[in-house]
Image: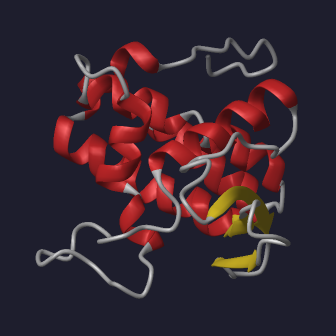
Amino acid sequence: MLEKIEDIKQALENRNYLSALALALTIPDICGKVEYPEFKYKYSTWFNERVSQYYADDTGWTGDDLKAVNPFFTGEMCWHLRCAFLHAGNTDVDPWGEKEDDDFVYTYKLGLSLGGVDSFGSSWTDALSMDTKGTKTKSVRIDVEKLCQSICAAAEKSVEDKGASAFQDHTINILDINNPHN
């Protein structure tokens, strides 16, 4: 696990953001499998427990300051980003919340940014007639570097808590023919 974290950090340092993000989005899979082997939703559970604290909205954190009360970027959202990014090569995520209520039909937009800015918000249009609903768009923009760093910090804490041996089955061994020290 630590070699994956180091690779992510090196990719960020070299401004290889897509590579860093691709590897970082696999970390919750691995950590979730180690920490929650019996859970169905390992990825989102691990992310919500370990990473969502970095995405607190204005409601802040729980009393112990370990979790965001109402995170604007959740494990479910990260899972959708992971699937879109790794399987389709884009960031077109599935809706992550309710589809409609009595007044609105909801649409969702997830975007990525560089430069240290996360943002979230909602915009809406009123219904054009009494027979239709308005549209409410929920938008979230996540800084790639911060997301990668947050996942790495959480993974390092997982390794510290569970021990490196718990991650032993999740290593990739590559023989470097050109390295005489193998």
**Above or below, comparing residue 182 to residue 147 in the picture:** above
- Is 55 located above or below residue 89 in the figure? below
Give residue 181's quadrant in the image.
top right
Q: Is residue 64 left or right of residue 54?
A: left
In the image, 125 versus 151, the foreground residue is 125
Q: Picture coordinates of residue 129 (x, y %)? A: 82, 70
Say if 144 sits above or below 55 in the image: above
Residue 145 % position (x, y):
68, 66
Residue sitting nearer the eye, 168 or 94 = 94
Outermost residue toward the bottom?
58
For the point 20% across and 76% down, which residue is it?
65
State the quadrant of the N terminus: top left
Q: Nearer the viewer, residue 140 or 126?
A: 126
In percent of the image, x 78 and y 24: which residue is there?
A: 87
Counting from the top left corner in percent of width and height, residue 144 is at 71, 62
Residue 10 picture location, percent across and down: 69, 54
Please, which residue is most extreme toward the left here?
A: 64
